[in-house]
Amino acid sequence: MINFPQSVQRLTIPDRAQIDGSSHMIGEKLGRLTVVGAAPSAGSKRRWHCSCDCGGETIAFQWSLRAGRSRSCGCLKAEELNKRQDHELHGMHASPEYRAWKLMKTRCYNPRFPEYPTYGGRGATVCEEWKTSFTAFLRDVGPRPSQQHRLVRIDDQQSFCPGNAHWLKTRSRVPKHRRHEVRRDLSILDEE
């Protein structure tokens, strides 16, 4: 038997949590996640059981939690996606109304679009509410009455906004040189 000095005999071997300092993560809040316990490692990568503010649960890698890549159980990503893709919530992204909404914005804000000089090039804009929300646009102009209708501004000097945009039947389209007469006729209707 080997006799070790007394200082070596008192040496205790620390457990893994003491070596890598990872036990201090329990109870830590990272984004919407709260670390509740250790999970089985994946190879040499440490993982943690986490509970989310929404009530969900997930297992996340320690490096991902520390780097801020894991911030929720997945609920945050869904919320952010819904904010960016508002059109997916209404299910009308393939409708003629949605295409007209996208075309209206493209004409006003994309200088590479062929019709931009007629719209955005002349200062045409889209009101802030319509620019960011298809549902607000649809609420204000309503569904397209038929395939022969297209979205137009009543007054070409104003932006696309509630009260200045409507569906016009393409066959009743007014030639450019007569638009001032139509505006005058519409203003007479307003005065009555």
Image (cartoon, grey):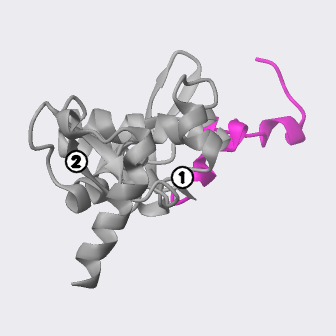
In the drawing, does residue 59 fall left or right of residue 89? right
Quadrant location of the N terminus in the rendered image? top right
Q: Residue at x 64, y 30 (%)?
A: 111
Q: Looking at numbered disc 2 in the image, what kind of residue is underneath it?
A: Trp
- Give the x, y percent position of residue 90: 20, 46
Q: Is residue 190 above or below residue 59?
A: below
Label 1: state its secondary structure: loop
The CA distance from mark 1 to mark 2 is 18 Å
- Give the x, y percent position of residue 123: 62, 50
Crowdedness near tag 2: few (<14), some (14–19) or many (≥20) residues, C-alpha within 10 Å = some
- Give the x, y percent position of residue 92: 19, 38
- Give the x, y percent position of residue 137: 30, 55
In the drawing, does residue 169 fall left or right of residue 101? left
Residue placed under numbered mark 2 in the picture: 167
Q: Is residue 165 above or below residue 16?
A: below
| Nearer the observer, 32 or 35 | 32
The region drawn magenta spans 1-28
Q: How many numbered discs, if any? A: 2
Label 2: state its secondary structure: strand
In the drawing, does residue 175 fall left or right of residue 9? left
Q: Residue at x 33, y 72 (%)?
A: 187
Q: Residue at x 85, y 35 (%)?
A: 8
Q: Is residue 54 above or below residue 188?
A: above
Whether 149 is among the magenta residues is: no
Give the image quarter of residue 170: top left
Residue placed under numbered mark 1 in the picture: 125
Crowdedness near tag 1: few (<14), some (14–19) or many (≥20) residues, C-alpha within 10 Å = many
